[in-house]
Image (tube, rainbow, N blue to C red):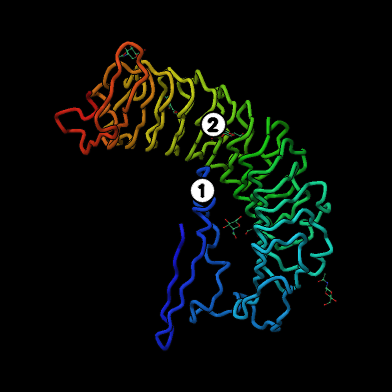
Amino acid sequence: MKLSLCLFLLLAKMVCQDYEDEHTAYNEHDTWSDAEIPFAHLPTFFDPSINIFEYGDHYIQYTNECASECFCPPTYPYAMYCDNRKLKVIPNVPQHIRHLYIQFNDIETLSASAFVNATSLRDINLSNNKIRSSQVDRGIFAKMKNLAHLHLEHNYLVDIPAPLPSSLQRLFLGFNQISKISADAFQDLVNVTMLDLCGNKLTDFKGKILPKMKSLMQINLCHNKLKAMPELPASVMQLSLENNSISSIPEGYFKKIPNLMSLRLSYNKLQDLPYNIFNLSSLMELNLGYNQLSKTFFIPRSLEHLYLNDNEFLDLNISLMCPSVDHTRPNLLTYIRIDQNKLSKPLNNFIYSCFPRIQYIYYGEQRVTQQLFVVASPIQDHHSAQQSSPVQAI
Ligand SMILES: *[C@@H]1O[C@H](CO)[C@@H](O)[C@H](O)[C@H]1NC(C)=O
Ligand SMILES: *[C@@H]1O[C@H](CO)[C@@H](O)[C@H](O)[C@H]1NC(C)=O
Ligand SMILES: *[C@@H]1O[C@H](CO)[C@@H](O)[C@H](O)[C@H]1NC(C)=O
Ligand SMILES: *[C@@H]1O[C@H](CO)[C@@H](O)[C@H](O)[C@H]1NC(C)=O
Ligand SMILES: *[C@@H]1O[C@H](CO)[C@@H](O)[C@H](O)[C@H]1NC(C)=O
Ligand SMILES: *[C@@H]1O[C@H](CO)[C@@H](O)[C@H](O)[C@H]1NC(C)=O
């Protein structure tokens, strides 16, 4: 999606500029929206009311210094734009630069010499290059004591470019070739809230690699080769594990991550889950599509969206999903997707008493061998539990 920013300036001159929306651009694998300062990299001349001096700077020595290959907006002296320039090496980064955009180039090597003066860096975007682990100078990032956001997604890394600075808050390593993570790779990263390792070749997460990251809230491990659930710090709220090879979840696993709000486990090999496994007080989104589940499990009160499509359910025992109905504290489920299972009859009407907020039941087509059940309109709209005719009936 492009966000078109058009501002009428004085003398009725119109300046329009298109910017890639960084959030949607990186959303193909379904991460939660990015909470980074969205306009951190926009030149401030679009808003004359904003002071070009960032907070805390009473005086900056104005400098034109900029690598000749790059562009440094005169009114936004902290940023250097070097993206999409077919660069093979990193240009020299001047001392005052805080935001460095160098994505979409052909960079293979990260050598410390380009960064000798760059002590102010806070954001680096090196995504979509050709960076190889063997050509990354050891400790190159550790020296950047202010670095908060590091984008290294879509490169050829085979391991984490450790050591990393403890100032780091968001680390993007998606779509590389990382197959193993050394025990100290994430040492001292106490302020990292977001870690993206989607699209790598990870097979396991043994040895307490992640539990040291005490602030970690979101972790993306989708499109890897994990066979077991990873060991995580208690702070995690969003966990993305789509498209791995996980076949079970140990009893009590979520007791160690009690604040979990979103769990994505579609495209795995789950067969049998402990009945109480999702008894969590904050869970809102649960995606278990494309697995081999057939047994009903307990649905926590907080859950709003449930995806069970493309599994092996022969029926859905609503009384098991919802063992008791408390009208003073109703269950919050609004959406359930159950298409592409083996259901042979409509869901029991008890579902509307149990989940009074339910709005959509996506029953769709079922893979029944004898008869084929098809619903004319796959999304069934249900606005009120009190409605007399059950909407999901076939
Ligand atoms: C980093 O670069 C990628 C392109 O590879 C782009 O999608 C993303 O928006 C950029 N992020 C930031 C924070 O600059
Ligand atoms: C670092 O700064 C010094 C002094 O300003 C300058 O001479 C040198 O060329 C700079 N080096 C790089 C790699 O930018
Ligand atoms: C982590 O964040 C806290 C709060 O913002 C800050 O006080 C602390 O200095 C940070 N730690 C490091 C190692 O940067
Ligand atoms: C799962 O990940 C593999 C790479 O590991 C990829 O080739 C495949 O397309 C992914 N499948 C889905 C359904 O996303
Ligand atoms: C869920 O856990 C709570 C305590 O955490 C417990 O009281 C309740 O019985 C559990 N519910 C089920 C269905 O296991
Ligand atoms: C649901 O499961 C309970 C407990 O196993 C059982 O007693 C009940 O008959 C089942 N209900 C249906 C509709 O299958």
> Compared with residue 209, is residue 348 higher up or lower down, i.e. above or below?
above
Residue tagged by mark 2?
254
Residue 327 at x, y = what percent? 26, 33
Q: Amino acid at mark 1?
A: Asn
Extreme residue toward the top, this view: 370
Q: Secondary structure at mark 1?
A: loop
Q: Is 285 in front, or is 326?
A: 285
Seen in the image, is 257 located left or right of residue 102?
left
- Mark 2 and mark 1: span between their CA atoms? 26 Å
Ligand 6 lies in which image quarter? Answer: top left
238 lies above or below 95: above
User: Could you say which quadrant of the image residue 300 lies in?
Assistant: top left
Q: Amino acid at mark 2?
A: Phe
Expressed as whole percent of the image width and height from the top left, the position of residue 195 reads 62, 46
Q: Earlier in the sequence, mark 2 or mark 1?
A: 1
* Residue 101 seen: no
User: Could you say where residue 319 lies in the image, as x and y percent from the top left?
Assistant: 32, 20
Q: Is residue 291 visible in this depiction of the protein?
A: yes
Horizontal placement of 17 versus 191: left or right? left
The tag on residue 86 is none
In the picture, which quadrant includes the C terminus?
top left
Residue depicted at 43% across the width and 22% down the height: 311
Q: Which residue is mark 1?
A: 27
